Amino acid sequence: MTTPTRFQILVCDGPSCGLCLDSEALLEHIHARVAASAQLEGRVHAINLTCFGRCDDGPNMLVRAVGEDEDPELEPDLDALVAVRGLYLGMDKARVDRVLDEHCETGQPIEDWVDVY
Ligand code: FES
């Protein structure tokens, strides 16, 4: 299997995850980790998405491969997320680190943690 070369990470920032659970801190952590890694920089792009509809499990994020013709800095059409196996629930910085080190390195979701959007 070919490892996807680029990933987009969507971190929800709706009222529940954003205001109550400080998902912005996770986004800043991802940006810092990516900027500090030659393996990740330029391949992994993290932006906000309003809500995955799983607020009770938050804060959440979704990892998806992006095509060469896609701008990973733009919020995708929600249809592009249907059936994507890359939704991670209940994230903290340690869990984010593992997703960056495993999913974003190998292209393979962490089976014990991942859910479908
Ligand atoms: S704001 Fe995170 S799932 Fe709704």
Image (cartoon, grey):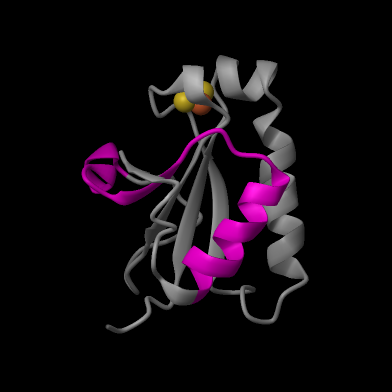
Is 98 covered by the magenta stretch? yes
Task: Say which quadrant the N terminus sits in.
Answer: bottom left
Is 85 covered by the magenta stretch? yes
Task: Say which quadrant the C terminus sits in.
Answer: top left
Residue 34: image quadrant is bottom right
Image spot of residue 43 (x, y percent)? 53, 73
Q: Is residue 100 above or below residue 68?
A: above
Residue 69: image quadrant is bottom left
Image spot of residue 98 (x, y percent)? 61, 59
Q: Is residue 57 above or below residue 88?
A: above
Image spot of residue 109 (x, y percent)? 40, 60
Q: Residue at x 67, y 18 (%)?
A: 19
Q: Residue at x 63, y 51 (%)?
A: 96
**Part of the protein shown in magenta:** 77-105
| Front residue (pair 39, 57) | 57
Seen in the image, is 23 located left or right of residue 66? right
| Residue lying farthest to the front in this orientation | 112
Q: Is residue 22 above or below residue 2?
A: above
Q: How many numbered marks are there?
A: 0
Image spot of residue 61 (x, y percent)? 50, 41
Q: Residue at x 37, y 80 (%)?
A: 3
Q: Residue at x 69, y 35 (%)?
A: 24
